[in-house]
Structures are given as C-alpha cells and as structure tokens.
Image (tube, helix red, strand yellow):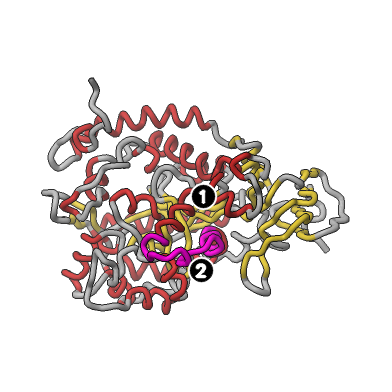
Amino acid sequence: MNPNSSLPTTLIKKAAWAVAWDPASNAHVYRRNVDIAFSGDTVTHLGPGFSGQADTVIDGSKIMAIPGFVNIHSHPQMEPSYRGLREEHGVPNMHMTGLFERCGSLMPTDDAFREASFEVAASELLLSGVTSVCDIGDNWPGWIDLFDRSGLRGFLAPGYASAKWKLENDHALGFEWDEERGRRGFEAALQLIDQLPKHASGRLSGVLAPMQIENCSIELLKDSFAAARERHLPFTVHISQSVSEVQEMVRRHGKTSIQWAAEIGILAPGTILGHAIFPDTHSWIRWWTKKDVALIADSGSAVAHCPTPFARYGHIMESFGDYVRAGITMGMGTDTTPHNMIEEMRKAMTFARIAARNINDVSTAMIFHAATAGGADALMRDDLGRLGVGRKADLVLVDLENPWMMPVRDPLRSLVFHAADRAVKDVFIAGKKVVADGKVLTIDRADAAARLTQAQARMMARTPELDYLHRTADEIAPLSLPIG
C-alpha cells in the first residue's frame, strides 16, 4: 500500500526521457516514455502505465526528468557579495590564491548582508536544478527560517575554528589562535544542529564543520568528528585547498594535510573533504610521498569538488578521473559565485580532460553521478540524488524544446555541455514546486540582488579597517578597465 495514498499526487505523464536509478547496476540509466508519480515528498511510481488517481498531471512529452542536484560544498551567505571583486583577485606570492587576503579584508557585515547574499545564491542554485545544499557558513538567528522559506533541502554546517588567518605581508600565512572561541563556536553549532531534526519542514539537517584543517586544534577536530559519529551526521573540513596550507601542515607535522588527518583519525565514511585538490602528487606540491589519494579512498571519505574558484587562480585538480578510479566518493559543490551547478559540472569535466590530457578521463555519466548520487552518499542519504520509487520527490524537469537542448540526441550532454540552467523548467523539492517555467517561486530574486548591492557597498566601506595594509577594496581588486 502506498503510505502517501491520502496525499495529493502529481503525475508526470509519459516523460520523453527520465534519468532513473537502477539499483541492480547501482547507476543512473535512461528511461523513455515513462510515467513518474509522487505523493507528499516521495516518488511512488516510475515506469509505464500509472493507473492511480492524480490530482495534477504534467505532460511529459517534451521534458526530461532528472533527480535534483546535491551540492555538498557551498557558502551562499557570502560568496555572491564578491561579484566583480574576486574573479581576478589573487596574490602571486601566496601561490596565486586570494583566499587569505580576501577573508581578512572583505567579509560580511551584518545579518541583512547574509540574508541578501543567501537569497541571491539560493535563486541561482534552484534555477540550476539544485535541490539539496550543504551551507558552510555563519551561525546566526535567521538562518533556519531563511532555508525554510527558500524551499531548499538544507544541510546546515555552522563553521567554527580555533584560529583565524592573519596576514602581515603578502607571502607568509599567519594565525591568530583563540581556542576558547573555537569551543564556543563548536557548542553553538551543536545547539543549532540538534534542533534541526525537529523542524516542521522535514528538510533540514546538520553537518559538523570545523572550518579549516590548519585553523583547528587536534582536540577540536577530534571532538567534532566524535560528535558527528554520535549523531550519525556528516563531518566536513576544508583540506588541501591551498599550497600554503599544505606547506604549513608539513612545517608543523612533517606530513601533508591528508596524511595528518588520517593520523588523527578523522578520515572515514561520512567525512567530506572540502576540495582536497592538492594531494602529495599534485604538480604544485610534489611532496616525496605518493599516498594521499589512496588514503582518502581507503578511509571511505568523500571529496567535494568545486572547480571554479581554483581555476580562477590557475589551479586544477589532477585529475578527477584518478580520484574516481581510486574508489573515492566524489561530490560537487558551488564554492563561489555564480552558484550554477551545471556550469560547475561542465568545468569539472573539461578541466579534468585538460589535466589528464585524455578525453576519456571523465565522462558525462561520471560527473552526473558526482552531482547527484555521489553527493547524496557523501551526505549519508541514499534517498536523495536518485530518481526512483521510495526516493525523495526532489526532481528537475528539463525543457527538451529549449533551443539550447536541440537536437536532443543525448539530453544529458545537451544539458551539461550546451543548455545548462537555461533549460531548467520546473524544480520540485519534497514534492513541492519551487521553480516554475524558469522562475523561482520562493524568493524575490530582483529584490535580493538590490539588497545585496547595498550590502556589498557596506562591506567595501569597511575594508580599509580590516586590511593589513589598510587598502580600499578598489585597491585590492581594481576594475577590469580604467574609468576614462
């Protein structure tokens, strides 16, 4: 008996294409001309000949139905505010990354800032087919309500750390340690995380997130990992995300970031490594060992890959395919603006082939798996990222008549290589429509963008107070052309 039989049922009638989950092969497969029904938040039918009663019927003859994308690494409370600032900002003496300088000089100013930034990012996420997102961000009072209103399935990861980065020059990474601050952040994170399962939406859960491997004490990392295991929740940490970080960990411990994480026991199933783009074999690292990728694979940890921010600095993962073939669970994230998941998939696939000098290093199927089932597995959720009976009704309807999709010989290739978000027609999360005909229903995107413009101005006005050289934002990130 259908446990949701008393709930309204939506039927997608004869979907021309569907990307369905095949449990026998543990992989996605194409299905043609199938009926897809869901009641409440659950898919109840996928196949020919649905014979039940439907309250809403959608003509599927011109659509492809796919599972919603699962974004396992994102910073929506902050990143959209960097539009026009960070795209070409980097520090050559810090191995090209602008991360440390930017985080010291350009930071959120207030909760209104965070709200506007989140709403802009959430709109982009929804329009690119993301239905689940791990938000690694500040712990503030309006966060839960904001997720609830957005309609997104939220994995809230309140960040905390024992130290902050501190710059005194443009070539050495310094630290300002305050273990008590880290402990207070950890306790506040637990308080928030422990209330999420009780939320009426049923869409919110938590992730333990000590922020960076080099900014957390061993005690804070171990206690965070233990708290995640006790609660059966994911644990995530930024690791191997910069050359400076890896060099700092070698200086402290005589081993790479990944090797030290393995030594202290925080690599395991349920651990998500934010980026892990610089293992010991990477051409920017060239450490004498060659075991980081194998350590990740053997531990059962997952990797959140976000190609855009690194590519802007001239960095690249070497290579995505090698991680997959080693047995690592790979997921995708939108670490920076724009929060366009499909564009991240395209970049990940293209960059991997460049890094490997091999067109066969990564396939469309491999990247699509990472953006859906792989991300769901990383978050310890086998009911997400898969389209099938009994799975959550988080799905995306792609317009096959969008000119960017045509001709539709292979609709996933058309979507990832050509159409991207332009062909996303409707999005459902937990059975509720949140995007209709390419328009977000839960957020006033234009209003959010206007508020974010004001928030960015407040952030830039504060920059000289925070920057170690007391520069303005315009001095740190000049305009692309002079004003003449």
Q: Give the Cα distance between marks 1 and 2.
A: 30 Å
Residue 56 in picture, x, y percent from top left: 79, 43
Front label number (1 vs 2): 1
Q: Amino acid at mark 1?
A: Ile
Residues packed near mark 2 inside 10 Å, few (<14), some (14 to 19) or many (20 plus)? few
Q: Amino acid at mark 2?
A: His
- Left or right: residue 256 versus residue 31 is left
Question: Which element type, helix, strand or loop, lies under badge 2?
Answer: loop
Q: Which mark is residue 78?
A: none
- Locate the N terminus and report the quarter of the image it occupies: bottom right
Which residue is the site of mark 1? 342
Q: Where are the magenta residues, as a range?
A: 352-371
Name which of mark 1 and mark 2 comes first in the sequence: 2
Q: Is residue 373 above or below residue 109?
A: below
Q: Is residue 138 magenta?
A: no
Q: Residue at x 59, y 42 (%)?
A: 404
Residue corresponding to mark 2: 232
Given residues 73 and 30, the one toward you in this image is 30
- Residue 9 at x, y percent in the picture: 79, 49
* Horizontal side of residue 330 vs 127, given as left or right: left
